[in-house]
């Protein structure tokens, strides 16, 4: 059998687009802007259609392909495993099949996503075995979102005292919860009770399993009151009315009373581990996650709802939403003045994300990463350059690849490279997802 010819260490990749109904419409969506700017094959913007997600990776639900050959990225990586790197192949079982341990996305959100969580590895295996059409893979899905624009999300349970205050201030919600469950939860305010998680679980389950007619009446009463008067919490007031306009009388409208409301500015990031309840509400973001498409939904969605598994699988940790923030650190690099490389490094093995901001007429040289990367240009234009061994491995040839907004690039393991922006451009902005163990 003839060995495959050497692959370039860096090459362009064609991503895929998901047109979920919650996406921004037409050219309002960065997903559409990136696809159009990069001349995605066969793509033209439909100004009446939603563009929700841009996928970059090897997940079987919507895999990327190599631009020059049209081969699946996973097939190409399986034939050229040096691009993945021996450490990653040893660490992640599916890497030898050409699969990356992460999935990289762009999100363009006009309408709230579902109240949801993602299963841990053991639960994901069980759900996939029982319902493979719903839970499409056996993997967990920790994820990180990095805001490209102002970005709004529900994220994790509020502190106990905040939840209790919201319940007391909202008698319409309080009235649908059984008195014994309310009593046990209110006890948490004044007593150091080790059963805090159990009490919160019972409360959340009671809300999420309330009969539809009771939910309808409670939400209707809240909305009518909010339309007449402003409550002190302006963010909560505004969000409840907005969610009702999108999903009238839905159970998910009640979740902001229990979950933190977060507003991120561009460059800010949040991380969500398995079992953390959340919902992205509006805005655009870069998202990276373990290579999974598993979602357990329970509200604000026309899709299948799985309330029992959502309630069962949550961590029931409470606290301020800021506990989910990921603060970036400087990434080891050789930069000219003005260039910036920031590392967002969440507490999981599957991925980290780099943000590169390179002014015009500037360059930044980055060290080799001992694993594969995918990068997307979110603004500007420039050049990637690297050294590559030819057939005679003693000879290194310098190669370059020109990139512009929307281009997606694969970078092989152990490849030092330089990003540069010409003096004629507006600069170069890149997000790069990678894995390194």
Image: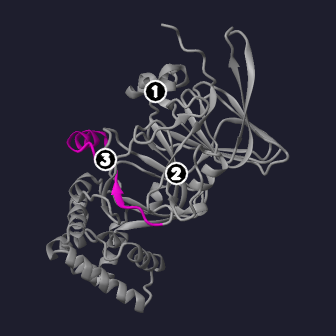
Residue 247's spot in the image, x, y percent?
A: 36, 72
- The residue identified by callout 2 is 326
Residue 131 within the magenta-colored segment of the rendering: yes
Q: Which residue matches tag 1?
A: 98
Q: Is residue 80 above or below residue 110?
A: above
- Provide the residue span drawn in magenta: 111-135
Q: Is residue 17 magenta?
A: no
Q: Nearer the viewer, residue 358 or 409?
A: 409
| Residue 265 visible at all | no
Q: Residue 184 location, x and y as percent?
A: 19, 70
Is disc 3 surrounded by few (<14), some (14 to 19) or many (20+) residues within 10 Å?
many
What is the spatial separation of the Cα atoms under label 3 and label 2, in whole angstroms? 21 Å
Count the marks: how many? 3
Q: Is residue 101 visible?
A: yes
- Badge 3 is on which residue? 119
Camera-nearest residue between 330 and 7: 7
Residue at image position (60%, 49%) is: 35
Q: Nearer the viewer, mark 1 or mark 2?
A: 1
In the rendered structure, the answer to whether residue 188 lies left or right of residue 17 reads: left
Binning the other alpha carbons within 10 Å of mark 2 as few (below 14), some (14 to 19) or many (20 upward) gives: some
Compare residues 204 and 14 and report the one nearer the observer. Answer: 14
């Amino acid at each position: 059998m003839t060995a495959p010819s050497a692959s370039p260490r860096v090459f362009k990749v064609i991503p895929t687009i998901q047109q979920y109904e919650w996406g921004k419409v037409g050219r309002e969506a960065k997903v559409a802007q990136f696809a159009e700017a990069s001349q995605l094959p066969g793509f033209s913007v439909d100004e009446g259609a939603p563009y929700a997600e841009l996928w970059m990776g090897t997940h079987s639900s919507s895999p990327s392909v190599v631009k020059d050959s049209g081969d699946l990225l996973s097939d190409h990586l399986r034939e050229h495993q040096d691009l993945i790197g021996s450490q990653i192949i040893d660490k992640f079982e599916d890497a030898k099949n050409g699969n990356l341990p992460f999935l990289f996305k762009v999100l363009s959100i006009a309408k709230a996503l579902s109240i949801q969580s993602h299963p841990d590895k053991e639960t994901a295996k069980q759900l996939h075995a029982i319902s493979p059409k719903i839970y499409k893979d056996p993997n967990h899905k920790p994820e990180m979102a990095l805001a490209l624009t102002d970005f709004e999300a529900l994220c994790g349970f509020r502190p106990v005292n905040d939840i209790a205050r919201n319940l007391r201030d909202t008698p319409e919600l309080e009235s649908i919860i059984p008195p014994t469950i309310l009593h046990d939860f209110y006890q948490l305010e004044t007593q150091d009770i080790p059963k805090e998680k159990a009490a919160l679980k019972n409360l959340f389950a009671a809300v999420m399993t309330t009969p539809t007619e009771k939910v309808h009446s409670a939400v209707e009463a809240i909305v009518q009151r909010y339309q007449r008067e402003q409550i002190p919490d302006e963010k909560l007031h505004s969000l409840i009315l907005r969610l009702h306009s999108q999903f009238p009388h839905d159970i998910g409208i009640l979740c902001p009373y229990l979950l933190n409301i977060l507003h991120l500015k561009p460059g800010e990031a949040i991380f969500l581990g398995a079992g953390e309840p959340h919902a992205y509400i509006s805005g655009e973001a870069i998202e990276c996650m373990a290579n999974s498409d598993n979602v357990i939904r329970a509200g604000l969605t026309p899709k299948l709802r799985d309330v029992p598994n959502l309630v069962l699988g949550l961590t029931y940790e409470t606290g301020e939403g800021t506990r989910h923030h990921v603060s970036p650190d400087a990434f080891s690099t050789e930069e000219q003045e003005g260039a910036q490389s920031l590392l967002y490094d969440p507490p999981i093995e599957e991925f980290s994300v780099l943000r590169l901001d390179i002014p015009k007429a500037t360059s930044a040289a980055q060290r080799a990463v001992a694993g594969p990367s995918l990068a997307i240009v979110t603004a500007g234009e420039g050049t990637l350059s690297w050294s590559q061994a030819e057939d005679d491995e003693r000879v290194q040839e310098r190669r370059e690849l020109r990139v512009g907004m929307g281009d997606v690039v694969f970078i092989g393991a152990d490849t030092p490279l330089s990003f540069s922006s010409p003096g004629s451009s507006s600069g170069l902005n890149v997000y790069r997802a990678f894995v390194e163990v």
